[in-house]
Image (cartoon, coloured by chain):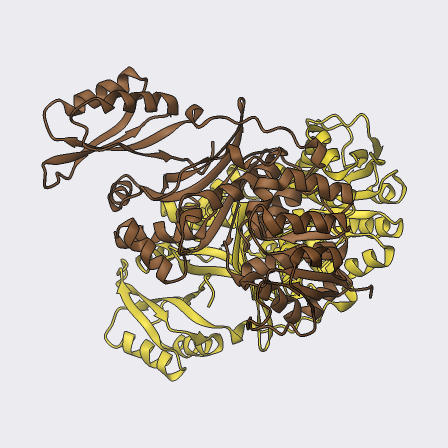
Chain colours: A brown, B yellow
């Protein structure tokens, strides 16, 4: 048996502690599979004394993670600090400069600094591995990078944020309001005290940008992701969606078109019988479509100690066994520039909910505005007068250009019958064409 | 760029032709990802003149695949002949003896000769890669071998045969009889002229034995798989299953218990809202449960030119890029003996359909036999008198030992009210515990 792969861990939250547990519990299994043991040699975290449920006494302690990346007796630095800048970024560069691999669960870092880091890793002859950064319970990075590598991937999409999925699933099941369910999720620890990173779609967008790069061989472009969160989804939308045969999910979607690559994160209406509709609670799911493989679907837990630590360890085992791949599938210098397709160029159908004064001619006005902007309607429902005598008009469109829909809604703004801004949710066919 | 990886293909049916197509269409992409081109140098098939829709003129032709494995200018032999013996086995050994890797889509070969071949490959310092042998559209071999390698896997199960899944899905949708749907599947080319390999569960059992070895680190033991096919499933069973909230699927299930490893392929009743219930038609799906990752689910096409060729090419790309793993995850010498758990030791619930003479006391007799053998009943329904005045009694049991159920049914055999042998379908909780 060869020398052990020596590992230093920066950040000892749940994932760091979980990684120590996996490596300890399965030391023998891991050594058998890799041909060598994987041994933790050093750790670094904010508070040395804190009880984390694991014995750290055998490891060298570093107060400064960057100093550890430079100075620890380690082949690999595991970066579990988080954030796209600061110590996580400094540590990663320090590790590369010292000729050490980096394994990370940090989606912000990979999404925002991925191309720069891939280049630095390659120059140093080491790797940046990040299976844990996207849907820890799903080996989707490896699937896109290796398992489906013989395909041209045309689309990758999925449920990428467990907090949003939990909130939306619960709203759907219970009919309760967003604020109420969010509060409960916070009390249960499923949502952060400041939940904006999750519920505004930023976390899902980080993951989507990473998947898009791997899928399409393009540079990671987080800044080009169109992002909308779930704050504006109401119990009413769930009710009408159900009547129309849809569920509401926050999806990340990226795909190639003749104009370039679109990347978007937003709430979607999806067929209640489709492949993502049953993915509830804290689960994530990803669909990839390749020209030879067709559609393949992956589902598993999105986060949490066990699934994320499992992904970190898988990356360590690849390094221990000497299995190499380019950080984003191809050499960093060969990653193509991503030509973004703006959201206004989306073609698809839409759910539009308008709150209107219930008077003669309103539906005709709406119909006229849609017609004048090339929007063909699949169905129009008028529902549920409220206490003030207002009504909801629910429209499902045929395929339309988003810029046309925006123009139609803009034209309606001046109409005095409009009581509040329209609610628009894109309808997505997750089955693909 | 390094020298090309040279590949010789034995067998030019749909998968062989598909592999040539993928390698040609994506030559540039593959070279970028592997750091070297993957080039076909030689081919062998039964009929040299046949038009396969691909240009073979640049390749050296061999009439004898074993001679090609020995003599071709190739680093890898792709074995697409099929069968656990004969030329497929001879070719594989010849390739290893000549120091060449083998990539195969041959589940029978891997399931029946896997341990022997893994040992031979290791001794020769080459690999046996078989992603295409199980659910071509799902990179499940890589997921179990690498992506989930930090876990102790306790259970792996799935829909592993697209022909059976198509027949069962169609029976469910249409209410038609088995023979009728099988005939149609044969006419459409979804089932073979001799369909027994698929519908009797042998193909699924081959795949299950491979998954079990990878999941549990045990020797491949196809001979220890308990196999039942789908011939006895009737339209009536679908009707009653639906009334009870179940779908019927042919599943392969393998898991570890305190007594050893069970491996079984048989029709199952599964919760109609569960994760495999929506997998229809020719799709396959696999669920793996690991101690850290929890449940992860994979779905994709089970067979066909594109998905299977995609899997073959993924294996080639691993070899081209120098990514190595043990054939079944651990060195062949460390694969544990599989201690089989006989089907009689299964504990779970059962659907039992009895056709009985509709006379007073029959249900009491049945209840007595079940009680006398420790079988507790969850529900008993009496339904649908037929023209002869016979009735169906449908029983769903609580968790029971299979040997107890068999004893209870044996005891009822002597009862003159029993019109035909009982139909028993195991109810499986695919969510796990």
Q: Is residue B42 above or below residue B193?
A: above
- Give the number of marks: 0
Q: Is residue B296 above or below residue B105?
A: below
x, y percent for residue B130? 70, 50
* Residue A263 appears in the rendering: yes
A394 displayed left or right of B325: left
Q: Residue at x 59, y 72 (%)?
A: A54
From the viewer's perspective, is B279 left or right of B123?
left
Residue placed most toward the observer, B367 or A28: A28
Quadrant of the rendered image containing residue A7 = bottom right
In this rendering, is residue A206 above or below B410?
above
Q: Position of residue B212 (x, y in %)?
A: 63, 62
Q: Residue A387, position in %: x, y?
A: 10, 41
On screen, residue B231 versus residue B363, left or right, reads: right
Q: Going by the picture, which residue comes out furthest to the top?
A: A372
Q: Residue lying furthest bottom in this view?
A: B372
x then y, percent, for residue B234:
40, 55
The answer, for residue B245, to whether it is visible in the render is: no
Question: Which residue is rendered at x = 15% and y = 39% of the image?
Answer: A384
- Is residue A231 positioned above or below B329 on the image? above
Q: Quadrant of the N terminus of chain B?
A: top right
Residue A18 or A100: which is nearer the viewer? A100
Residue at image x 51%, y 37%? Answer: B188
């Amino acid at each position: 048996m060869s020398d052990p792969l020596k590992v230093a861990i920066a950040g000892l939250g749940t994932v760091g502690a979980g990684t120590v547990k996996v490596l300890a519990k399965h030391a023998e299994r891991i050594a058998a599979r890799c041909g060598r043991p994987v041994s933790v040699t050093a750790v670094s975290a904010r508070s040395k004394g804190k009880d984390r449920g694991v014995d750290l006494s055998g490891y060298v302690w570093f107060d400064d993670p960057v100093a550890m990346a430079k100075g620890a007796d380690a082949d690999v630095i595991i970066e579990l600090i988080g954030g796209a800048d600061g110590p996580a970024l400094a540590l990663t560069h320090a590790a590369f400069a010292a000729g050490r691999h980096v394994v990370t669960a940090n989606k912000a870092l990979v999404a925002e600094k991925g191309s720069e880091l891939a280049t630095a890793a390659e120059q140093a002859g080491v790797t940046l591995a990040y299976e844990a950064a996207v849907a820890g319970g799903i080996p989707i990075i490896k699937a896109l990078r290796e398992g489906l590598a013989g395909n041209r991937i045309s689309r990758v999409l999925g449920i990428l944020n467990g907090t949003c999925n939990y909130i939306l699933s619960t709203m759907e099941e219970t009919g309760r309001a967003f604020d109420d369910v969010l509060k409960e999720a916070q009390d249960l620890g499923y949502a952060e005290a400041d939940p904006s990173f999750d519920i505004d779609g930023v976390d899902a967008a980080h993951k989507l940008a990473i998947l898009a790069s791997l899928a399409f061989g393009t540079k990671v472009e987080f800044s080009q992701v169109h992002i909308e969160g779930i704050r504006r989804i109401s119990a009413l939308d769930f009710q009408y969606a159900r009547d129309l045969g849809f569920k509401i999910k926050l999806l990340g979607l990226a795909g190639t078109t003749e104009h370039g690559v679109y990347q978007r994160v937003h709430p979607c209406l999806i067929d209640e019988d489709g492949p993502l509709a049953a993915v509830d609670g804290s689960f994530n799911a990803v669909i990839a479509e390749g020209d030879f493989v067709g559609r393949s679907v992956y589902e598993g837990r999105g986060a949490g100690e066990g699934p994320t630590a499992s992904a970190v360890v898988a990356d360590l085992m690849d390094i221990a066994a000497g299995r190499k791949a380019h950080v984003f599938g191809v050499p960093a210098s060969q990653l193509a520039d991503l030509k973004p397709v703006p959201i206004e160029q989306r073609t698809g159908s839409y759910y539009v909910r308008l709150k209107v004064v219930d008077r003669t001619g309103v539906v005709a006005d709406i119909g006229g505005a849609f017609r004048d902007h090339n929007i063909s309607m699949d169905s129009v429902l008028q529902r549920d007068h409220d206490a003030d005598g207002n009504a909801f008009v629910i429209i499902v469109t045929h395929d339309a250009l988003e810029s046309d829909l925006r123009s139609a809604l803009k034209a309606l703004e001046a109409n005095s019958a409009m009581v509040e801004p329209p609610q628009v949710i894109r309808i997505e066919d997750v089955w693909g064409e």
